[in-house]
Image (spheres, grey):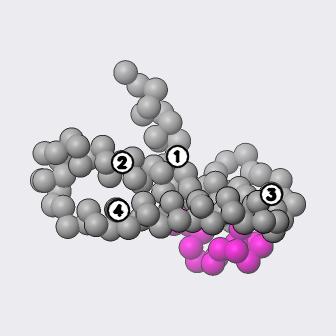
């Protein structure tokens, strides 16, 4: 991996870690409190969306760096990364589910 790609992946990893840390900090919010506070809802949704996007961006960079064509669907990316030994095979179903949320965010952003 060249220095430029490494720099991008490193930046994306730091962003991902920041968003995951924020989401962990909100785990103590009860469901009732969450549902009653639109600001918390929006902040958590945005942090989750950014974490998913960062993970997908990192995956794309790693596949391109390995000379692999990008998949048509985000869900497939993690199976391809597992085949390259980058992602643990047992993590693929969970990561694929996470990747599916990207489409949900895109759809919900167009309603209204």
Residue 91 magenta-highlighted = yes
Residue where numbered disc 1 is placed: 102
Q: Residues within 10 Å of mark 3 (few under 14, many from 20)?
A: some
Q: Residues within 10 Å of mark 4 (few under 14, many from 20)?
A: some
Residue where numbered disc 3 is placed: 64
Position of the C terminus, as image quadrant, is top left
Q: Residue at x 70, y 74 (%)?
A: 86
In the image, residue 85 lies at what x, y percent?
Answer: 73, 77
Position of the N terminus, as image quadrant, is bottom right
Q: Quadrant of residue 10?
A: bottom right
| Magenta-drawn segment | 80-95
In the image, residue 20 lies at what x, y percent?
Answer: 41, 65
Q: Earlier in the sequence, mark 3 or mark 1?
A: 3
- SS class of the residue under badge 1? helix
Residue 69 magenta-highlighted = no
Q: Earlier in the sequence, mark 2 or mark 4?
A: 4
On screen, 3 above or below 103?
below
Residue where numbered disc 2 is placed: 45
Q: Residues within 10 Å of mark 1 (few under 14, many from 20)?
A: some
Left or right side of 89 for 101: left
In the image, residue 67 lies at what x, y percent?
Answer: 87, 60
Residue where numbered disc 4 is placed: 22
- Decide if residue 97 is in sight here: no
């Amino acid at each position: 991996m060249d220095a430029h790609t490494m720099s991008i992946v490193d930046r994306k990893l730091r962003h991902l870690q920041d968003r995951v840390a924020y989401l962990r900090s909100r785990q103590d919010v009860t469901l009732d409190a969450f549902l009653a506070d639109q600001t918390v809802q929006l902040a958590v949704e945005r942090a989750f969306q950014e974490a998913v996007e960062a993970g997908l961006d990192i995956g794309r960079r790693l596949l391109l760096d390995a000379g692999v064509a990008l998949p048509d669907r985000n869900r497939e990316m993690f199976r391809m990364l597992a085949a390259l030994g980058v992602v643990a095979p047992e993590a693929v179903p969970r990561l694929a589910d996470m990747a599916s949320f990207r489409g949900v965010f895109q759809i919900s952003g167009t309603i209204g």
